Structures are given as structure tokens and as C-alpha cells.
Image (tube, grey):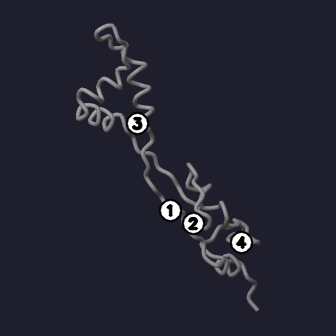
Amino acid sequence: MTALLEPKTEYRDRYTEEQYDEMLNECHEQVKLCGMTFDPAYVLKQIDPVAYRCGFADYQEEEEVFLCPVCGEEHGIEEEARWCCQEEDDFTCQYCGVLHGSTELAKACCEEEE
């Protein structure tokens, strides 16, 4: 591997609809109607689907995910993704320890002049 590959950044939804339903059901009392009991999330979704979708959109957050540039594995930290399948030693000068963007630059960093 000659050049350091950078991880890919993706943004994904943090919460699922099921998690939103759980939050609604935990924060609000059960709905009683004609002797029957219903979950608040179910009632809102059935009676006013637009309000339900707007509430879910407001509840939703994005999270940043970093993908290893070699294998595609997800990481929560960019540096972990960067070094997942790339050896840091390949990009570090063996004499001064400076990290470079390619193996060639690391090898040429402190080469003795002939």
C-alpha cells in the first residue's frame, strides 16, 4: 500500500421508528377509548399520520459514521477507520517517527544522503 487512504464519512439516522414509538409510549399515558386501551404511538400514527411523521422527524438525529477505506467496516471515530486495515508503521519514518501520507514519503524522510 503506497498512499494513505482516507475513510469515507456517512451520515445515518440515529433512531428507528420503533425507538420513537417507545419514547412516545413511555412519556404519555395509555389511551382509553370505549373500554379499550391503546399505546399513544399507535393512536397518533392512526389518527394523525402527518403529526406522527413530523414528530418523528423532529425526534430524529443524524450520526456521523466513518468507513474503513479498505474493508468498509463502520467506526465511530475517524482515526479508527483510517487505521483499520492500514498499518501506521508503513507511513511512519523509522528514524524520526513522523507520520506521512505515503510509504514513499516515510522512507524518504530521513534517508541518508550518499
Image position of 91 (left or right of 35): right
Kind of residue sitting beneath label 3: Glu
Residue at 71% over, 79% down: 107
Res 90 label: 4
Front residue of 104/51: it is: 51
Kind of residue sitting beneath label 4: Asp
Distance of mark 4 from mark 3, alpha carbons?
44 Å
- The earlier-in-sequence mark between 3 and 1 is 1
- Mark 1 — residue? 8
Residue most toward the top? Answer: 35
* Image quadrant in which you'd find residue 5: bottom right
Res 69 label: 2
Kind of residue sitting beneath label 2: Pro
Distance of mark 2 from mark 4, alpha carbons?
16 Å
Give how far across and how far down residue 59 sits, in percent. 35, 34
Residue at 24% over, 26% down: 47
Secondary structure, mark 2, is: loop
Give how far across and how far down residue 98 sits, in percent. 67, 67
Q: Pointer 1 and pointer 4: residues touching (CB < 8 Å)? A: no
Can you say whether 38 is above or below 6 in the image?
above
Front residue of 61/16: it is: 16
Can you say whether 20 is above or below 66 in the image?
above
